Image (cartoon, rainbow, N blue to C red):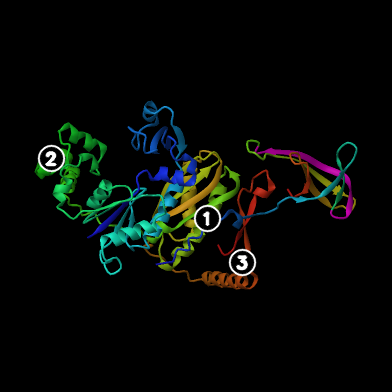
Amino acid sequence: MKILCVMMPHFPWLCEVLRCPELNGRQTVITQDSGSQKLILDYFPALDGLRRDMSLQQALSRHGQVELLTADTHFYRSAFNELLDALEGVSPLVEGAELGCAYLGIDGLQLIYPDDATIVNAVREALPKGLSPHIGIAGNKFLAYLTAWQSLPGGYMVLARDAASFLAKLPCDVLPISGKSKEKLVRFGLRTLDQVAALPPGPLLSQFGPEGKRMRELAVGRDDTPLIPRTMAEAIEEDIMLSSVSVSIEAVLAVTASMLEHAFKRIAPTGKGISGLALWTRGWGNGYWERHIRFKEPAMDVKRATTRIKQVLEDYPQPGPVEQVGLRIERLGYPRGRQKSLFSEVRAKDHLQEEIRQLEFRLGNPPLYRLKEVEPWSRIPERRYALIPSSR
Amino acid sequence: MVTDSRKTLRADSFKPVNLPEPVHVELDASGQPQVVRLPRRQAIIAIDDQWRLDDEWWRNEPISRLYWAVRFSSGNRLIIYQDLVGGGWYRQSY
C-alpha cells in the first residue's frame, strides 16, 4: 500500500503562533500538567536541548528566560481535526496519528493525481498557508513517517530506492518503542538501524520481548500496521460556553446533556450508541480538565450516558470554576439486545417532535424552548434555570 | 454514514430565565424605596423583608444587590433590588 505522511513538527507551538502571531520568534515553552508535575508539550523550535515530556524544571535549567504557556489541548486538537477534514478532500483515507502527523492512503488515486508531485501539491493546497509540512511517500506507515522526517520543511521525499539502504544509517531513536528499550539499545551499543537489522530475531526477542520482534521488523523496513481512517465518531465534537462561570456538577451535567442530545440525533440513523467519549472543561484562569469515559454497554440515550458521566464528575472534581464544556465522541457501538416497548409513548414523542418541526418551519427557528434546571440552588435567581431550544 | 453538520453549540442557544427588569423607584429621605413605577406609580405601604446578595467578587463584574420585598396598597407584593455596583433598580422574582 502506498502511504503519504504529512508531518508538521511543533504543531502545538504553530497553533499558538497562528492564534497569536506576536509569539513568533519569542522563546516560548508550552507546558501541560501530568499529576503534580508540569511537563513540556512543545516549544519554540530554536530552543535546543528540549524534548517533549521533559519536566519543566529540566527545561528551565537549560533555558531560564523562556515564556511559559499553558497547553490548550482542545484548541490544538480542533485545529488538527480541521486539517484532517481538509486532507479528506485529497484522499478519503486519512488517519490522524499524534498531533501534527497524518497518514493518507493514496492507492488508486492515479486517475486524479497522475504522479506523486501532483498529489503532494494537492496536499499542500489543502493545508493552511505558513505550515510548511514535511511530506513523505513510501510503502508503509513507518517508512512514510521516516521519509517525511528526512524531507525538508515544505518539501517532499519519495522512497523509491531500497528501504534497507535508506534505513541503514538512521539512529535507533526513530523507532517507535519505549524510552526504556531505547536506553537498553544504547547500553548494548546498538545505535543505528542497520545494527539492529543485522541481529538475528532470537536474541532481540529474548532481550526485548515482543517489542524486540517489532523493532527488528521496522529496522528492515517492514511495517504491517494498517492505516486506520477516521470514523464518523471522531468527527463529532461539541462545546458550549456557559453564560457564567459555575462550580456545580449539575450545571456541567445540564450542558453535557444538551450536547449529548445533539450527538445522539446525529448517531441515531446508524443504530449505534456511544461506548466512549471524552469530556473536557476549561475553567476560569484557563485550567483544563479532561476525562475519557467508557461505557460497559453502549449508551443509547442521554439519560444512560449522563448517569455514568455524573459518576465521573463526582469522582474527579473540577479544579475550579468552569466556563466552557465540551465533549468528543470517541467510540460507537451496537447494543447487545434491546426489548422494544409495547407502549406507544415513543410514537407520541415522535408525534410531538414532528409538531415542533412544523411550528419551527412556520414561525422561524426556534420558537419552542424547554426549561432546564441549571443551578436550582443558586443565590442568583437568573442562574437557576435556562431555556434550551426544544429541537436540540 | 451520517453527514456531520459541524454545528457547534453557542452560548446564545441557552436563554437565562428570570432576568432582572429595570424599574424606576423613588426613594424616601432615609433612602428606602417609596414608590415603584410599573409603569403606573404604586406607593409602597410596607417592606416585608430586605436582604443583601454579594457574589462573584473575584470577577471583573462582581454581583452586589440589595433586595427588598415590598407590598403595595393594592395588596400586591413585589421583589425589587438595587444594584450596588451599577446603581440601577430592578424587579426580579426570587
Q: Residues within 10 Å of mark 2 (few under 14, many from 20)?
A: some
Q: Nearer the viewer, residue A307 or A196?
A: A196
Helix, strand or loop for disc 2: helix
- Mark 3–mark 2 distance (CA, rounded to whole Å): 67 Å
- Mark 2–mark 1 distance (CA, rounded to whole Å): 56 Å
Looking at the image, which residue is at 33% across and 63% down? A91
Which numbered disc, 2 or 1, marks the residue that appears first in the sequence?
A: 2
Does mark 2 fall on the same chain as mark 3?
yes
- Range of magenta residues: B38-56
Look at discs 3 and 2 and give the one toward the viewer.
Answer: 2
- Mark 3–mark 1 distance (CA, rounded to whole Å): 21 Å
Name the residue carrying label 2. A195
Q: Nearer the viewer, residue A152 or A2?
A: A152
Name the residue carrying label 3. A365
| Residue A305 % position (x, y) | 47, 55
Residue type beneath disc 3: Asn
The correct choice, above or below, for B91 with respect to A354 in the image is: above
Residue type beneath disc 2: Gln
Name the residue carrying label 1. A257
